[in-house]
Every structure is written in C-alpha cells, then in structure tokens.
Image: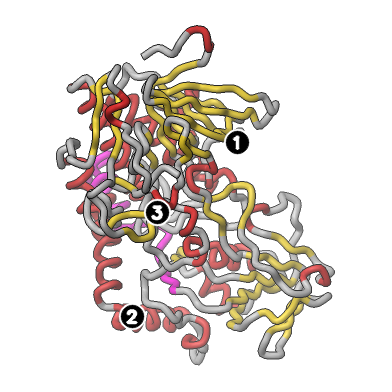
Amino acid sequence: MTPPQSRHIEHFDVLIVGAGISGIGAAYYLQRDHPGRSYAILEARDAIGGTWDLFRYPGIRSDSDLHTFGYEFKPWRDEAIASADKIRAYVCEAATEHGIREKIRFHHKVGAAAWSSDDARWIVDVERTDTSESTQISANWLFCASGYYRYDEGFTPEFAGRDRFAGQIVHPQHWPEDLDYAGKRIVVVGSGATAVTLVPALAEAAGHVTMLQRSPTYILPVPSRDSIGDALTKVLGEKRGFAATRRKNIAMQRVTWRFCRRFPRLSRNILRRINSAQLPKGYPVDVHFNPSYNPWEQRLCTVPDSDLFRAISSGTASVVTDRIATFTETGIELESGASLDADIIVTATGLNLLAFGGMSLTVDGAGVHLPDAVAFKGMMLSGVPNFAFAIGYTNSSWTLKVGLLCEHFCRLLSHMDAHDYAVCSPQAENAVTQTRPLLDFAAGYVQRSLDQLPRQGTEAPWLTSMDYRDDVKLLRFDSVADPNLRFAAAGAAGTATATQHAVIA
C-alpha cells in the first residue's frame, strides 16, 4: 500500500534495523526469497559490522567457530576462531557481494516506531546521528536486527576509591586507540569472555597482567584451526567441505551442551582435568578455575590454542580470586588484605543490554510495554503486528539461530502473499498461561536486564528454543500457519490487531 502522497514519507516493504552480522544476513535472505520487495537497512553508526566494528580492544575474537558463526550461504575460508577484523571483513564482503551495501542508510538511528492498523504500516522516527536531522520512514514490516547489547556504554559497578587511583581506568567497550600499555602493570577486573581474551593479548607487551576475578568461569581450550574441517575442504572442495564442517561443528556444539546439562558433575570434572593439564604442576586449579555454578548455566569461555594458560604458565599473566575492598592511589586493595599494584586497570565487568536498540513501539497510539509482551517463536511479539526481531543462541553460535529466523520470516511473507494478507500479529490471549525470562541464562549482564525484556512461554510456539535441531524443524520445515497468528487482508487490518491489555500498556 502506497503511503499518502501529502505526507511525503519514503516507504519500504521492509525496514531492517542494524547493519551487523544479523542485519546483513536478514537482507540476504529477504532479497533472495523476495526480490521484488523493497527494503532498506538503518544503521546508527557509520560502518558495517555491529559488535565486530564497535569493539576494538586487544585480542578481540569470536568465541564460536566461524564455520557455524558465519553465514550458511558464504563459506568461511580462514581459521576457525577468528579475530574481529577478519569477521568484520567477512561481513562487509558479504554485503558487497550481494549488493546489500547500497541499501544501508548509515547514521540513521531509530528512536520510535508507531503502527497504524488503519494504514497497515509502521511510521518510524529516525534521527541522523551525523547531522541531528529528524525524518520519518514508513514500512509494511519492521525487522529488528540490532542484537541486545547497548552500544553507547558498558557495565561498570561502583568501586570504592575509584577516584583515588592515579593510573588509567579503561572499559573494553571504549578502548582508547592510543593506549600505550607496553611494559605496564595491568589488572583486568573480570573473568568472562572479554577478560580471558584480553589477558593473553595484553601479556604479549605488558610488564605483567593480573586477571582479578570475584568468582571463576569455566574455560575450555580449543584449536584456532579446525584440522578436520581443513581436511574436509581439501577433499570435498570449498563449498561441500564448508557444509560438511558446519554440520560437524553444529553436532559437536549440541552434544557438548546437552552433555554438560545432563551430567554437570562429570562435565565439571572433565573441565577441571583439562585445565589442570594446561597449567604448571601444583597450580591451585580449585581456587581459580572452579566455578560455583554448573557448566553451561553460563556460557563456556573458549581460549584458542590455550593462549590464556600459556600466558599464566610463562609468568606474564596471573589469576587472583578475591574481592575488591577499594581502589588505592597505586592499584587495588583486596578484601583479603592483599594488594595489587597497577598502572592500568581494565574493567572487563560486563555489558548492558538494550532491547531493540532502545526504540519505543506503539500500536494504534498505545505504548508497548516490553516486559508484558511474549515472544512468539523467538522472533515476534504478542500483540505487535508486522514486527520481527533476530536474537541468536546463547548456548551455541549466534548466527545459527538468526539464519533460521530469517528463513522463517521469508516463509511467513510468502504465506501472506499466497493468501493476500497484509497484516500478521501473534496473539497470546488464552494461549500463554505461564511465562519465564526471554533469556534463560545466569550471566550477570542478562540477569541485570531481565525486567526490561519481553518474556517467553513454557511451550512452543511461545518457547524460545535453544536447540538447533528443534529449530530446524520448527522454523525451516513446519507450517507457517499457526492458530496463535492472526492475519488480515489489506483494508481489514483492524481485525488483526485487537488490543491485548496484557501486552499494550
């Protein structure tokens, strides 16, 4: 439906928000399966790549293999665990190869989106981050591919005495390009994926690096190259070899996760033995590598080619498990009474989440209160018409889930075309009796933000699956039609968007 000419609002069939790995993937599937549909990608920053362009701290890399983290449609040709610059180049290459780059509107930040049932479209408020100019764009569908990290700030807890420290304090999300840490004493506060990446990278040039952790994290050494994958590619050729390696790694990820969840005590013992074998004889593994939770209640941290353990073994890095009492002029005083001298303190203390890039949603003038909305198939929101989003796996490669969601979105559009539908809205009334957090994950950055996110149900299709095999069946092969979806033809949109008081605040 063409928007009223008097308003002079540019219109697209689909607006994709975010030009990171999810947004570029969504654009690929959309133009492959629906070449006649118009679309644009709105990106608040000035570059492609999302997280992989934003974060620039030393050593930043994937913690999943790129054969599964990369796109199914574009073979990965490099080492399995890759640095951010290689991932960024890969995403940019995909955008260029498939003509997606010219569809991106850089410096376009979405502030709000308003759905009109009468017009069966979204009106999206956009701010130009380079000129501060405001504009509006209309779309039949809004596809949010902005992930869930807040890009303008990371999480840093309140540290007593922080202002007393005479050195430099850095958060990895805002790493200074000119930071000179050669020969310096560095304390990295944290034990998650960012910390275990930073420590060995910094240790290559620093005087000494200490990873100060309040509690340990499970850490698994992995090879940076997939030797079996390399052999499969050599024998089968690039395309078939990549596909075979991808299937192998998907199976390995799934088996590892299910094994850890089913046999937590055995899994803990196996990981402890692996860690012990990587460290000097007599190293206090039970102090520094013995988490209080079970494997995969939080994501396992991977270290390529045992780089963290090698740094510890060489003496260029060390681990301290303690709590911070206060910052001092020269470093950190610990609750145990010990102290750590430092020239630089890196607060690798986590991230903040931000649902849908911070955009506010309204449906027919009523604001959508996200914590009251329920996710449908992990990709739509109850009571919110023609809105889809992409959130990947927390227990496997992010992009595995996103690819399936994009395929299902395109199948949904085809179903609507076949029946001359203009509007699609999931309805949770009388269908969802119990809900739980959208992300069933114990990580601190998730727990801090659960009250700001939508929820999920306890049974499909309201359950957000974290099992790739189940999702292949549901999203790739099962019917798009569902009794929980309400469709309407053009001109009858109002019948599809009956307001749910449990969803619209």
Front residue (pair 139, 71)? 139
Image height of 101 relative to 459, above or below: above
Residue 461: image location, x then y, percent: 23, 49
Residue at the disc numbered 1: 45
Label 3 crowd bin: few (<14), some (14–19), many (20+), radius 10 Å: many
Q: Spatial distance from mark 1 to mark 2, Cα to Cα?
A: 43 Å
Look at label 3 and name its amino acid: Ala
Image height of 113 relative to 470, above or below: above
Look at label 2 and name its amino acid: Ile
Q: Secondary structure at mark 1?
A: loop
Give left or right: position of 150 versus 131.
left
Q: Main secondary structure of the magenta part?
A: helix
Residue 486: image location, x then y, percent: 24, 34
Front residue (pair 337, 458)? 458
Mark number for residue 270?
2
Mark number for residue 80?
3
Indicate which disc, 1 or 2, sits on the residue closer to the N terminus: 1
Residue drawn at (20%, 28%), measured in percent from left and top?
415
Image height of 24 relative to 391, above or below: above
